[in-house]
Image (tube, rainbow, N blue to C red):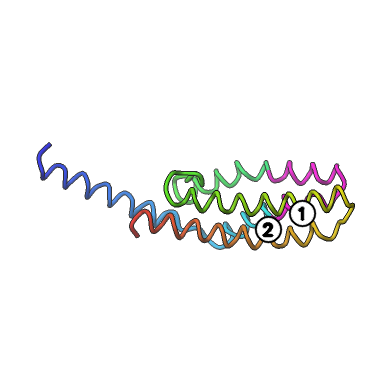
Amino acid sequence: METAEVLSALDAKRHAELQMAKAATCPPWRHALFGLMMGGLVASPAFEITIRFAILIALLCLIPIIIHSDRKRMGMFINGYRRGKTRIVALGILAVELSLYFFSVVRGLDHQDHLTPLLLGALGVVVGIIGSMLWQRVFVREMGA
């Protein structure tokens, strides 16, 4: 390849990354929905088994709806576990949410404590919202915007 071709290809790549970064800016409701999904999962051990399964089914049904919404709004869906620093953020969110869920299960199912899972679920909402916003910020920075 000629130097001019290489520079042109690199410029096109940078331009495409900037376009992705602009498109990836989510509205506040998108971060809130992610937080509510995480909080719902964490709070689910507060409820009896039928309600717990209903919550899990609702959460699973929301995933394709969110994917469809992102594709319609942005023209793409960006996997949260993509390589790079965003994966570190995603794994951090996962570690915190799973820890909250673990303690929620122990308190809710082993000790029949229904308040602690609800409180941990509220914390899971906050962690999910902040984590989603942080993930977006890191992604936009990685794309060079």
Q: Residues within 10 Å of mark 1 (few under 14, many from 20)?
A: many
- Residue 124's label in the rendered image is 2
Whether residues under marks 1 and 2 lie with C-beta atoms below 8 angstroms apart, the answer is yes
Q: Which residues are magenta?
A: 39-59
Residue 118 image position (x, y, % from top left) = 79, 59
Residue 27 is a magenta residue: no
Please tell me how many numbered marks the rendered image carries.
2
Q: Secondary structure at mark 2?
A: helix
Residue at the (56%, 58%) spot, across then down: 131
Hey, which residue is sitting farthest top in the picture?
1
Predominant SS along the magenta part: helix
Residue 142 image position (x, y, % from top left) = 38, 54
31 or 1, nearer to the observer? 1
111 left or right of 120? right
Mark 2 is on which residue type? Gly
Mark 1 is on which residue type? Ala
